[in-house]
């Protein structure tokens, strides 16, 4: 016991010696940073007013030398929309701590928000020299390069960011680069990798579904859109895209049920009302279609697709002056689209303005590169006007497009009514004996109507096959293949009967489009309705 007591007596001075240094360490805490924890606490609670008051007091005590207080004040100003003031404060942080990559990243971010992309690239490069393994720097550099149209550098930086750390947003931006370059296949591969990495991201699933729609792989498109709706039943883009596919295949009631769900979340969406209008159009409820399209036009008066659809519906209702009005407005917004000029020619033909109809056809032919209907319709129009020589030239040009498509295997199936009309016109012009037509498939999807042209007094008129183009909404694509109906004789004095509708699909993207293919046909011409064909853009 005595030995233990002696040991205790020996240890007591040691314990006393350990306590002595503690008071000496307290003054070593930097006074500049003593309120940082409180600033951080109020900032993450989004109590910005209290946070700013504490920051003001802290900066007053430290004479503006507290880096963290200045940093958080700059973040708050950016949230309030004061980008220039936040830039100046972040620059102050960079001066206080020039070796911090975080400060330079925030300076570059503010420059980016101000639209100074080249200056932002320079600052990001400087930050990258301080920290070469920060994926966020590489990602943001890639985004800046996209805005400066340097897609090659952007792709390199985004791939580097993926090597450092895979992230959904990086995949999306990389896919966007390929889409901007028109490389749909590469974009699809990128989004497939993204979905494998993040299978529950609804935006990735929706975008991949839209890309599959554009490539014509409707089964895969429907699977991915269905998965997106499984994770988020109210996903607006996925609903619009899936509804567009149903609408394209004639399931108007099912599509309308989808659109009802979307209408709760986005009741003022122009593409939504555009698609609803074209559903009514497909069900031949033209007044309801015009009401919905007028609402879409009110919400987005400069959307050429909506104006285009309004032109189609008015042509169907034989209101050619109104159709001319909307189609002219669409042409002003989309002056390089040949189908619009073709539709305008339909309206002008029915308004007995053959001269301007001819000019409209000539403009459509000048702009068109692959649409058979432009040349065929123009040829029929010229034949009905008695200009057989010019009609033969257009017919021969159509022959060249047909043979080119067959040789390159772009399109080996043609609508039987298009074939029939071409054969009738070829017989009338004593041409087309060597024209190759592949056997049309059973499920020809697009439908077109023919519209009457003013005949010459010396011959029986042919019905002019007018392709009433295609309109798109934000969740559907654009179909480049169109087909028409053809009949032998048209009574010019009778008004054309309503055309059928082919709603299709969005822009992304769009980031999302709907398509409709129509034609106007004279009353005596036989109407044949075929299934619509959806093509995604």
Image (spheres, helix red, strand yellow):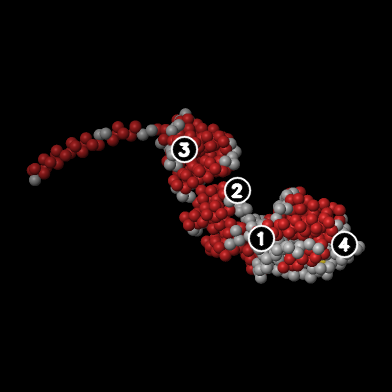
User: Residue 190: image x %, image y %?
Assistant: 52, 53
Going from N to C along the chain, the mark reached first, 4 or 1, is 1
What residue would you read off at disc 2?
Answer: 180
Decide: marks 3, 4 in contact (CB < 8 A)? Answer: no
What residue would you read off at disc 1?
Answer: 406
**Residue 44 or residue 500, whichever sits in front:** 500
SS at badge 2: helix
Per the model, the C-alpha gap separating discs 4 and 2 is 46 Å
Per the model, the C-alpha gap separating discs 1 and 2 is 29 Å
Decide: few, some or many residues near mark 3? Use Cα within 10 Å; few <14, some 14-19, many ≥20.
many
138 versus 413 height, above or below: above
Q: Tell me the tag on residue 128.
A: 3
Going from N to C along the chain, the mark reached first, 1 or 2, is 2
Dot in front, 1 or 3? 1
Q: Residue furthest left?
A: 2
Decide: marks 1, 2 in contact (CB < 8 A)? Answer: no
SS at badge 3: helix
SS at badge 1: helix
What residue would you read off at disc 4?
Answer: 455
At 87% from the left and 62% from the top, the residue drawn is 455
**Residue 522 or residue 422, whichever sits in front:** 422
158 versus 393 height, above or below: above
């Amino acid at each position: 016991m005595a030995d233990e007591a002696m040991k205790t007596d020996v240890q007591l001075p040691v314990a006393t010696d350990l306590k002595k240094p503690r008071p000496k360490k307290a003054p070593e805490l930097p006074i500049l940073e003593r309120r940082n924890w409180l600033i951080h606490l109020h900032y993450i609670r989004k109590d910005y007013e209290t946070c700013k008051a504490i920051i003001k007091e802290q900066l007053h005590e430290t004479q503006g030398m507290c880096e963290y207080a200045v940093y958080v004040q700059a973040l708050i100003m950016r949230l309030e929309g004061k980008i220039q003031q936040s830039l100046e404060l972040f620059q102050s942080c960079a001066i206080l701590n020039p070796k911090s990559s975080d400060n330079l990243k925030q300076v570059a971010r503010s420059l980016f928000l101000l639209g100074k992309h080249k200056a932002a690239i320079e600052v990001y490069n400087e930050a990258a020299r301080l920290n070469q393994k920060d994926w966020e720097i590489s990602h943001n550099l890639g985004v800046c390069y996209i805005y400066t149209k340097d897609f090659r550098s952007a792709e390199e930086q985004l791939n580097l960011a993926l090597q450092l750390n895979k992230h959904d947003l990086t995949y999306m931006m990389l896919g966007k680069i390929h889409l901007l370059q028109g490389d749909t296949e590469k974009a699809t591969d990128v989004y497939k990798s993204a979905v494998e990495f993040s299978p529950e991201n609804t935006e990735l699933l929706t975008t991949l579904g839209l890309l599959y729609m554009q490539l014509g792989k409707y089964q895969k498109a429907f699977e991915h859109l269905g998965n997106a709706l499984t994770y988020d039943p109210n996903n607006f883009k996925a609903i619009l895209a899936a509804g567009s596919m149903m609408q394209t295949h004639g399931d108007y009631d099912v599509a309308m049920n989808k659109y009802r769900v979307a209408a709760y979340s986005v009741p003022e969406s122009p593409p939504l009302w555009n698609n609803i209008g074209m559903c009514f159009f497909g069900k031949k409820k033209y007044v309801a279609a015009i009401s919905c399209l007028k609402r879409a036009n009110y919400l987005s008066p400069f959307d050429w697709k909506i104006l285009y659809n309004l032109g189609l519906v008015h042509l169907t209702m034989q209101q050619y002056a109104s159709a001319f009005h909307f189609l002219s407005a669409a042409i002003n917004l989309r002056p390089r689209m040949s189908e619009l000029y073709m539709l305008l020619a339909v309206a002008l033909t029915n308004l007995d303005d053959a001269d301007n109809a001819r000019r409209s056809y000539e403009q459509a032919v000048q702009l068109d590169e692959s649409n058979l209907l432009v040349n065929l319709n123009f040829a029929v129009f010229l034949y009905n006007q008695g200009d057989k020589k010019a009609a033969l030239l257009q017919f021969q040009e159509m022959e060249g497009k047909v043979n080119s498509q067959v040789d390159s295997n772009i399109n080996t199936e043609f609508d039987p009514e298009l074939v029939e009309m071409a054969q009738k016109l070829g017989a009338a012009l004593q041409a087309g004996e060597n024209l190759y037509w592949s056997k049309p498939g059973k499920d020809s999807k697009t439908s077109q109507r023919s519209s009457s042209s003013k005949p010459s007094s010396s011959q029986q008129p042919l019905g002019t096959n007018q392709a009433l183009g295609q309109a798109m909404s934000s969740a559907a694509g654009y179909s480049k293949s169109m087909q028409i109906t053809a009949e032998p004789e048209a009574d010019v004095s009778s008004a054309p009967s309503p055309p059928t509708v082919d709603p299709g699909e969005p822009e992304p993207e769009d980031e999302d489009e709907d398509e409709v293919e129509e034609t106007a046909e004279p009353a005596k011409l036989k109407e044949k309705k075929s299934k619509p064909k959806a093509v995604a853009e």
